[in-house]
Amino acid sequence: MKSILLIGTGGTISCRPAADGALAPALSVREILEFVPELDELCHIDTLQLYDLDSTNIGPEHWLGMASAVRKHYDGYDGFVILHGTDTMAYSAAALCYLIQHSRKPIVLTGSQKSIYNRDTDARNNMLQAFAYASSDMAFGIHIVFDSKVILGTRARKVRSKSFNAFSSIDYPETAIFRDGRLISFLPAPSDDQAVSFYDRIDPSVFVLRLVPGMDAGIFAALKEHYRAIVIEGFGVGGLPGGQDGALLCAVHDWLSSGRLAVFSTQVQHEGSDLSIYEVGRIARELPGVLEARDMTPEAVVTKLMWVLGQTSDPVRAQELFSTPVMHDIIV
């Protein structure tokens, strides 16, 4: 029987209604386990209550805390399950893919759209499947297990705000699924023999700028004081309005010239960016030092940039790190 460490961070799964009807995290991980007694037959479980937060309040410092907890207990367990709110779960999963690399042991994030305290909830099913995957010999690395799907941490997105099938794997196959209570794996564990690597530095000075028609280029100057990197979510396959002599192009050139990073991405959920197709994209691509997100998810782009900035202050090295695939975050 495998040993799994259950790490609690809060989220809807641990909520209990207050007097005014509002939900707030209230149940400990030990109390949550009492709702799923079947787990006793699946694996040995120890618990660690790390946080007790609505996931809207979880950010970079908490990602580091999760990674540190896994690192501290890594040799003592066969796998880890992290209970987490759904709103920022994809960010945490992506961040952990960069903070914990080459893990042969599974690190599974799960939660629910309704509290386990409710009568009609997805919480019990998600917990059972999370521990089933974490206990499997085929399990590896950082994944979200939710609504019978096992999704790689760098490819997961929350695509529905209320329904039980809240998460999708974006432009990449699901690692595994559960069908009639049976785990069916589609993708094997990586064959590399590299030892697990833990990182303990991250820099959150990353801003995501969603382009809208008519945007004032002065926004770049206003952001300089606070941010080292910017993600520009453009239209379609990406690019900048205004052409070769446009104010936005001049602003991005100035941003890059100051030693900061700029990544071009897209507002479109599937198929990614490609600055080579249109003139507005090629003009942007020719800027010295510009980066392209390609088919990375927004959550992966942001958390990878934060991880990169935590490792180096050299723009050239930062560009190399960002462009190097990690856990299939870049496919094309």
Image (cartoon, rainbow, N blue to C red):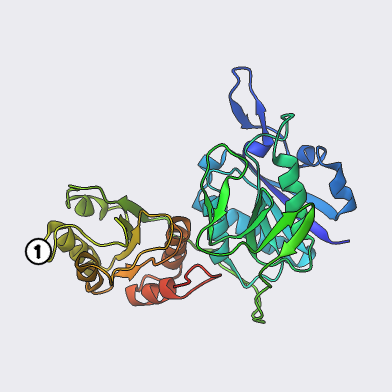
Q: From the viewer's side, name the closer residue of 308 and 200.
A: 308
Q: Left of 181 or right of it: where is 12?
A: left
**Which image quadrant is residue 298 in?**
bottom left
**Which image quadrant is residue 124 in?**
top right
The residue at which mark 1 appears reads as 245
Q: Please, what secondary structure does the residue beneath circle 1 have?
A: loop
**Which image quadrant is residue 76 in?**
bottom right
Task: Return the x and y of residue 130 as percentages of the image width and height.
Answer: 73, 53
**Residue type, mark 1 in image:** Asp
Total labels: the figure holds: 1
Task: Return the x and y of residue 308 as percentages of the image width and height.
Answer: 44, 67
Would you place residue 55 above or below residue 243 in this image? above
Identify the residue at image location x=46%, y=76%: 324
Task: Return the x and y of residue 254 as percentages of the image width and height.
Answer: 18, 64
Identify the residue at image location x=79%, y=52%: 181
Q: From the viewer's side, name the closer residue of 163 and 287.
A: 163
Identify the residue at image location x=25%, y=62%: 239
